[in-house]
Image (spheres, rainbow, N blue to C red):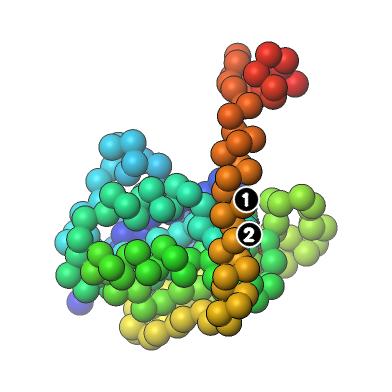
Amino acid sequence: MTESIGLFYFSGTGNTQVVAELLAKAFEQHGAQVEIVRIEHVLQGRARFEPEAYDLVGIGHPIHCFDAPRIVYDFVDILPRAEKKRTFIFKTAGDFISVNNAGSKTAIKQLECKGYDVFYDRIICMPTNWTMKYSDEFSKQLCYVATAKTEHMAGEVLAGQERKLRINALLRWITKLTSRGEDLGARFFGMFLSIENKAICWPKTRPL
Ligand SMILES: Cc1cc2nc3c(=O)[nH]c(=O)nc-3n(C[C@H](O)[C@H](O)[C@H](O)COP(=O)(O)O)c2cc1C
C-alpha cells in the first residue's frame, strides 16, 4: 500500500528545509507519496493541515537553545485533535551534544495530549548557523552524512520502528530554563528590529 506522508517544517536558514527535501526523496524512493509544507504557511492560512489526509505526519524544526523554536509551539497549538495519528519528528542541530536530546520533548508531550502518536524522534546534525561557521570541508561532510541518515530514517519510519531520544531529568530542567531565557531574550531583541526598505535595521531609527 502506498503511504501518504505530510512533512511540515520550519527552517530559519535552510538546513531543515534541505533535510525535509532529502527525507521526501528518500520516502518517495520507497514508493510513498509526500507533501512538504512550511509551518508558517499553515499559520498564515496559506496551507491546511488535515491529519486524516496522511498515513504519517512528520514535523521538522531546527533546535534553538535545546528546544523547538516558538513557531513550532504556535503550530502545535492550532493542530486539531487526532486519533492516534502516527507522527515522527526530524530536527536539525549544529552540534552532537546530548543536551540536544531535549529538543522536542515539550512539543512531543503537547502533540501526544492531542492524540498524535509520536513514535520516532531524530536529530540530524547540519552546519551550524549559531555564533560560528564550520569549515567548508566539515560542512560538506555533515551534508553527506545527512543524506545517508535521511535514507536510513525513511526506512525506519516506514517500518514503524520506534526511536526515542533520552535525557536525564536534571539536564532536562536545565535545558528548559535555558531555552525559556533564550526565548524571552529573543523576543526582547526582536522588539528593536524593524524592516525599512527591505533591510533589517537595528535599532529602529538607524539603518545598519
Ligand atoms: C538562536 C539559535 C539557537 C541555536 N541553538 C542550538 C542548540 O541549542 N543546539 C545546537 O546543536 N544547535 C543550535 N543552533 C544551530 C541550529 O539548530 C542549526 O544550525 C540548524 O541546522 C539550523 O536550521 P535551519 O537552517 O533550518 O534554521 C541554534 C541556532 C540558532 C539560530
Q: Is residue 55 left or right of residue 159?
A: left
Q: Nearer the viewer, residue 146 or 124?
A: 124
Specify the label residue 182 is tagged with. 1
Q: Is residue 69 left or right of residue 182?
A: left
Q: Is residue 25 visible?
A: no
Q: Image point 62% across, 75% down: which residue?
A: 171
Q: Secondary structure at mark 1?
A: helix
Residue 146: quarter of image:
bottom right
Q: Image point 48% across, 49% down: which residue?
A: 70
**Labels 1 and 2 touching (C-beta < 8 A):** yes
Q: Is residue 163 above or below residue 93?
A: below
Q: Secondary structure at mark 2?
A: helix
Q: Is residue 35 visible?
A: yes
Residue 35: quarter of image:
bottom left
- Quarter of the picture for ligand 1? bottom right
Task: Name the amino acid, label 2.
Answer: Thr
Q: Residues within 10 Å of mark 2 (few under 14, many from 20)?
A: some
Q: Which residue is mark 2?
A: 178
> Which quarter of the rendered picture does the N terminus lie within?
bottom left
Q: Image point 56% across, 64% down: which residue?
A: 176
Spot occupied by residue 12 in the image (x, y as percentages of width and height): 56, 46
Spot occupied by residue 202 in the image (x, y as percentages of width and height): 69, 24
Q: Is residue 134 above or below residue 167?
A: above
Task: Name the amino acid, label 1.
Answer: Glu
Q: Is residue 104 above or below residue 46?
A: below
Q: Image point 62% across, 52% down: which residue?
A: 181
Spot occupied by residue 5 in the image (x, y as percentages of width and height): 30, 64
Specify the label residue 87 is tagged with. none
Q: Nearer the viewer, residue 121 or 98?
A: 98
Q: Is residue 56 left or right of residue 94?
A: left
- Whether ligand 1 has any atom under 8 Å from the Cβ at mark 1 is answered as yes
